[in-house]
Amino acid sequence: MQILDTETNSYTDTSAIFIPNTLEDYKVWKIEKIYQQCLVDVETGFTSESTGYSFPLNKDYMDNFTQAGLAFVLDPDLEGVPFNTTNYGLKVLNREQFKAIFKEGKAHKENLLMRYFGLKAGIEDESCDTIAKAELINWV
């Protein structure tokens, strides 16, 4: 069955609506929901402040970052690695550009994960003792 959300003027499948049996059930569900939102933000990626290039941080791109980093480590004479950006297409990154972008991507991911763990701790805290209190803790 579908219901109309009058705020967004869209339909929602009611089988996707979670109805908790207990506060603990709700907390487990809420933590997973926030974690999934965190992953979406991680994978959406970042724009490098040092180059202006944008990169997603999905599994394929993370693998590419790892391989490019290893290429620089294994070949000290390597001058650059080709890397696809989401806003400027294929670019060749020199060693210094790559190091700066790698650090920025790492910081992007770590900041989002730290935010997630802070929210998770708030939900797990004993002072969060009602569903209403847990509902106040959100990713956005």
Image (cartoon, rainbow, N blue to C red):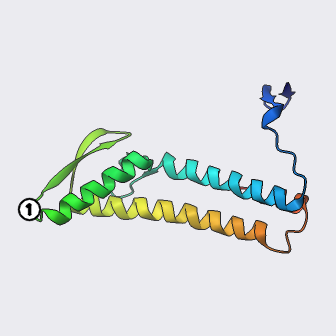
Q: Which residue is more in the foreground, 51 or 30?
A: 30
Query: How many numbered discs, if any?
Result: 1
Spot occupied by residue 101 in the image (x, y as percentages of width and height): 34, 58
Q: Is residue 84 above or below residue 105?
A: above
Q: Residue at x 20, y 51 (%)?
A: 81
Q: Residue at x 54, y 65 (%)?
A: 111
Q: Residues within 10 Å of mark 1 (few under 14, many from 20)?
A: few
Where residue 7 sits, quadrant-wise, is top right
- Could one spot residue 51 in this view of the protein? no
Q: Which residue is more in the foreground, 99 or 88?
A: 99
Amino acid type, mark 1: Asp
Q: Is residue 34 left or right of residue 129?
A: left
Q: Secondary structure at mark 1?
A: loop
Q: Quadrant of the N terminus?
A: top right
Q: Which residue is more in the foreground, 77 or 94?
A: 77
Where is mark 1, residue-wise?
A: 77
Q: Is residue 110 above or below residue 58?
A: below
Q: Is residue 134 left or right of residue 115?
A: right
Where residue 120 sits, quadrant-wise, is bottom right
Q: Residue at x 32, y 55 (%)?
A: 65
Q: Is residue 104 left or right of residue 70?
A: right
Spot occupied by residue 97 in the image (x, y as percentages of width and height): 26, 58
Spot occupied by residue 79 in the image (x, y as percentages of width and height): 12, 56
Q: Residue at x 31, y 57 (%)?
A: 66
- Of all residues shown, which one is farthest toward the left? 77
- Could one spot residue 14 in this view of the protein? yes
Q: Is residue 46 left or right of residue 93?
A: right
- Of all residues shown, which one is farthest toward the bottom? 126
Spot occupied by residue 5 in the image (x, y as percentages of width and height): 84, 30
